[in-house]
Structure formats: structure tokens, C-alpha cells
Amino acid sequence: MLLVFNHELNESGTCPCCGSVTMSITAQCRDHGTWVCDYLIRWTKSAPDHPWAIFLVMETSQGHAGITLEYRTDQDAFMVGDASAIAWPERMLITKPILLERAEVIGHDLAQSVFALLDFIWISDPDVPGRSECSS
């Protein structure tokens, strides 16, 4: 059974372009005590036009892999990005993950695992703002 552990919700500063508060969630998913992934979600409160940044570190056939996703509230959609194209928070680099490009995820079996984890996090993490709360 997949569960969320080591969960932290923090104000992580202010957005440089609009001055609104930036929030972040860091946590782990574990399955019967076995590590599955670490994740960090960062969003700007009261700024629905700002995409969320989602950093996911999980085990793959290549070892620990870092995957970035973006959530756009205006489109209610997630998109895998190029992990090397965005500055990663230091705490997500402790295991020295291989930063995967979008083309290494989309169109491969890994995509199914990534989106299954994302669905679990979206539904299970109590601090992920609901779609109706994204602008509050």
C-alpha cells in the first residue's frame, strides 16, 4: 500500500515577478515501508497564471532518476519537462539522480509509472491545493 511520509509544507519565499508567497511541499512515497519516490511541489499562491513546478525522484532501470513536471492551473494539465532545464532544489539532489529529458519519459514505460505516482500524490497529499483553491 502506497503511503506519504516525511511530509513538510513550507512557505519558500516570494515570487520574483509578482511578489506573491511561494509554497512548497516535500515528501516521500513508500510502499509497505520501501522507498518509492521523493517529491517536491512548488507553487505561487494567488497566482493561477504561474505554473507549478513538480520535482520527482524515483528508482528506474538507470538508477535514481529526476523528473520534472509542470502543472498549469489554467489548462488543468500536467506536462513532463526537461529535468536539466530547471534549477533543482538541493534537497532533491542528495541521491544524485540522473536528470531525465522529456523524450526519455514520454513514449516509454516510465511515463505510466510517473503519472501513476502523480495521480497518487494529487489525490493523497492533503496539502496539494485543490483545483478550486489554486488561486487563493
Image (cartoon, helix red, strand yellow):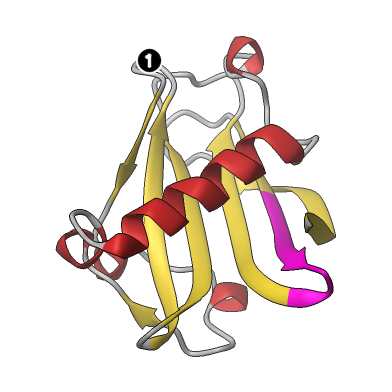
Circle 1 is placed at which residue position? 74
Three-letter residue code for mark 1? Asp
Residue at 83% x, 74% y: name it.
33
Q: Residue furthest top?
A: 132
**Magenta segment, which residues?**
25-34
Q: Return the residue nearer the eye: 23 or 95.
A: 95
Residue at 80% x, 35% y: name it.
126
Image vertical order of residue 112 relative to residue 126, above or below: below
Would residue 95 be counted in the magenta stretch?
no
Image vertical order of residue 64 relative to residue 36, above or below: below
Residue at 60% x, 57% y: name it.
40
Whole-percent x, y for residue 96 in the image: 48, 90
Whole-percent x, y for residue 77 in the image: 37, 27
Quadrant housing residue 74 = top left
Q: Is residue 64 left or right of residue 29?
A: left
Quadrant housing residue 127 = top right
Number of callouts in the render? Answer: 1
Image vertical order of residue 12 relative to residue 99, above or below: above
Would residue 30 be counted in the magenta stretch?
yes
Q: Residues within 10 Å of mark 1 (few under 14, many from 20)?
A: few
Quadrant for the C terminus, please.
top right
Q: Return the residue nearer the eye: 84 or 27.
A: 27
- Principal SS element in the magenta part? strand
Q: Is residue 31 left or right of residue 115?
A: right
Residue at 22% x, 54% y: name it.
106
Quadrant for the N terminus, please.
bottom right
Whole-percent x, y for residue 65 in the image: 42, 77
Secondary element under disc 1, as helix, strand or loop, is loop
Q: Is residue 54 left or right of residue 100?
A: right
